[in-house]
Amino acid sequence: GLYVRVRNMVKHFNTAKGLFRAVDGVDVDIEPSTIVALLGPSGSGKTTLLRLIAGLEQPTGGSIYFDDTDATNLSVQDRQIGFVFQSYALFNHKTVAENIKFGLEVRKLKGDHDKRVQDLLALVQLQGLGDRYPRQLSGGQRQRIALARALASNPRLLLLDEPFGALDAVVRKQLRAGLKEIVRSVGVTTIIVTHDQEEAFDLADKVVVFNRGLVEQQGSPTEIIKRPRTPFIMKFVGETNVVPATSLLAKRMRFATSKSNVMFRPHDIRLFKSPPADDNGVLTIGANVANKANLGWIIKYTLRFDDDVECELQLTRDQDEREYSLVVGSRVFVHVNPRSMMGFNQS
Ligand code: ADP
Ligand code: MG
């Protein structure tokens, strides 16, 4: 697989309101035969970076390397990239087989095209559908054909921009599993743009989180989830409690920080109906149940400490019925392991 390195990539657009910094100095390494997900809110610059890597946009500054060659000014054709976009972009007047063959013809590849089409149909598990037209396929099937077409010419790099964005949740999950398997078996270096965390964390070896044209953090899914480096990442990847560093809770748990706020996940709370007998190991602090929200399989409690600071706790319905079944106004005792707490200056 291809090794892609993006160095200090900048793309500014001139707009009616002035210069817009869509990508504002981005460094990313995409190791050979890995899947990298560009994750972030809408408008954060993910598609722009993908288009820069594809050669569909000219950078304002910075460089792109494919292995050891500077690819910054290569033409789109010479980059040998396969694309899949959210909108299917299949030719409606061509059959499935003709659509896939198009992927071979644009690169003027030699060899037995019909055999290759059959192999590609098998790869995406749509054998026997070669004679159909796109309108005779489901959305999920069309995206698989788009993938087969993108892979037809043995690209050095596969770029996917929200490829499952238009599909329903069940189909998305099926396609995700299929994509992972196909990409692994072909061994092609892959970059996928998504705003869906589950998709990013499930598919990718490395997740690159974008925010306003900048990379907030990049790393393995585990690193991003367990060691968020900024408040943005902390909040982006899960439910987050934010309490002042001076709050009774933070002090009682002996969480020492020079930062103004302390953040932790709702599931890091341990709850007791009465204070544990041996308080040495498990420090607790009293709180009142201020609210109980029934979210189906999840029960969400709002706990209010005596300094009026609040935090939230989520339990499964079963766990709640078995162990707590608290009513609003109950007194409870709260423990949060200080090792699961993180200090941040912003909220
Ligand atoms: P994402 O894919 O993360 O949703 P994009 O990369 O598509 O975000 O866009 C990032 C920002 O750049 C958006 O605010 C978008 O409006 C702006 N943008 C993208 N392309 C252009 C363009 N050709 N001209 C002006 N602004 C653009
Ligand atoms: Mg986009």
Image (cartoon, rainbow, N blue to C red):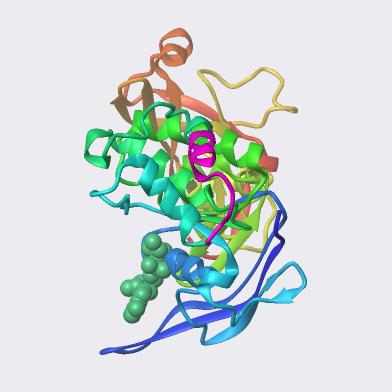
Percent coordinates x, y for residue 270 in the rendering: 57, 27
Q: How many marks?
A: 0
Q: Quadrant of residue 296?
A: top left
Left or right, 107 with respect to 86, comes to right
Specify whether residue 312 is painted magenta: no
Residue drawn at x 67%, y 44% as measured from the top left: 187
Left or right, 216 with respect to 307, comes to right
**Looking at the image, in which quadrant does ligand 1 appear?**
bottom left
Residue drawn at x 43%, y 46% as measured from the top left: 100
Which one is nearer the viewer's eye here, 236 or 303? 236
Q: Quadrant of residue 19?
A: bottom left
Percent coordinates x, y for residue 322 in the rendering: 46, 8
* 55 to 317, vertically: above or below: below
Q: Is residue 246 visible?
A: no
Q: Residue furthest right?
A: 68
Q: Is residue 254 visible?
A: yes
Which one is nearer the viewer's eye here, 27 or 187? 187
Percent coordinates x, y for residue 43 in the rendering: 37, 66
Left or right, 3 with respect to 213, comes to right
Residue drawn at x 64%, y 80% as measured from the top left: 63
Q: Residue furthest top?
A: 322
Start-end of magenta stretch: 108-120
Specify whether residue 112 is painted magenta: yes
Q: Main secondary structure of the magenta part?
A: helix
* 287 to 71, vertically: above or below: above
Q: Quadrant of residue 102?
A: bottom left
Percent coordinates x, y for residue 90 in the rendering: 32, 50
